[in-house]
Amino acid sequence: MKKILISLLAAAVLSGCSKNEGGAPPTSGVPVPDPSAPISLSAGIDATSESKAAVSGTAFPASTENVFRLTAYAGAAAPSTDWSTAYFADEQVDSGAESALSLKNAQYYPANGDKVYFYAYTPAATSLTVGTSSAAPVANYTLTGQEDIMAAQVTTGIAKAATGTQSQPELAFTHKLMQVRFKMVKDASFMEGQKVVELKIKGVKTQAKLDITTGELTCAPETTADLSLPITAGTNDGITAEGTTLDGCLMLEPGTEITVGVIAGDKAETGEDEITGENITYEDVKVTLSNGAAGVSHLVTFTFKRNSIVPTAAITDWTVVEEEGSTDIK
């Protein structure tokens, strides 16, 4: 599985106030921070947008607000049963012009020498359930297919350096969902000039919970919806002999089978076919994926024939998987 490795390097003390403006209020009973020992990602921020879409490669996008959220606990050991007292909770992290990272609100290592344990996740959640004396904090999501949920933890613990260079955490993010993209191909029997008007993955679980301390993602089976791929008429939407890869992707719970609905036509704005006067609708295209693991991106190819669609699938970046097999839809 491809990981995103972020090094939280020591840098200049960040300017600005140090009050907590994260998703959870400051907690009582935490160690006193030492302003001479900053937890610092970068000294410069040039933030212009918020990160929510799929992240590729090994770095977060540059000049972006809210690339991930960071929670920390302090003490002699990482918490294992009591999560009620965070050192700081759900703080915003931004990226600068060259993907340099910085906490929106400056944070510091404890003056008493306690170790700090770090827990990060992205994107910002729909809501956050704070930790209690018996339960870890949980990020709650309503999935639309556009969230690239990732998490990382550093549980070895880092304390204020007594002398010399201050150690800083390295967060290795991993994708928690799988990604699906689509390529459209016509064979000789299928009509010319057809476009994809609508494409959706059916029956997707849309309520997800991420335990930010373990990175475990669970989806509620009782809440499902059809997730539509955003399609812009006239932009990479044609069904062609050489094949057209549709823009965008959908991200969903890992699994080995999806059901897809497709509407095609020669008028992208209506889906109306000039020859028949009706939409060409394929209701339930079953696609089997050979590797439905988290962090895997599948490129599903639909070959349109006169009376059917034949799907195949391959793995692309993040991790790419070639898929074999076909299903005719009549």
Image: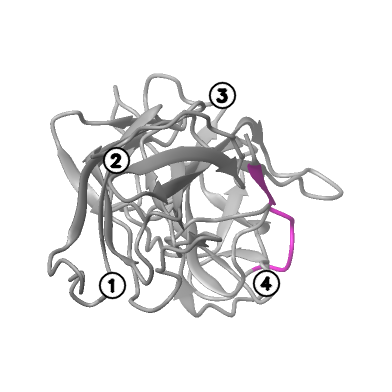
Residue indicated by mark 2: 130
Side of 174 where 81 appears, left or right = left
Residue type indicated by callout 1? Asp
Residue indicated by mark 4: 43
Residue bounds of the magenta highlight: 3-13
**Label 2 – label 4 distance at C-alpha:** 29 Å
Residue type indicated by callout 3? Ala
Question: Of the residues under marks 3 and 2, which one precedes in the sequence?
Answer: 3
Q: Examine the image and state in which quarter residue 38 appears.
A: bottom right
Side of 42 where 267 appears, left or right = left
**Label 4 – label 1 distance at C-alpha:** 53 Å
* Label 2: which secondary element: loop
Instruction: Inspect the magenta stretch and tell me whether residue 9 lies in it.
Output: yes
Q: Quadrant of the C terminus?
A: top left
Residue indicated by mark 1: 266
Q: Is residue 39 visible?
A: yes
The residue sitting at the front extreme is: 189
* Depth check, front residue: 263 or 58: 263
Q: Nearer the viewer, mark 1 or mark 3?
A: 1
Side of 304 where 277 appears, left or right = left
Compared to 38, does 65 lie above or below?
below
Residue type indicated by callout 2? Val
Q: Nearer the viewer, mark 1 or mark 2?
A: 1
Q: Nearer the viewer, mark 3 or mark 4?
A: 4
Residue at 47% x, 47% y is 301
Question: Of the residues under marks 1 and 2, which one precedes in the sequence?
Answer: 2
Residue indicated by mark 3: 77
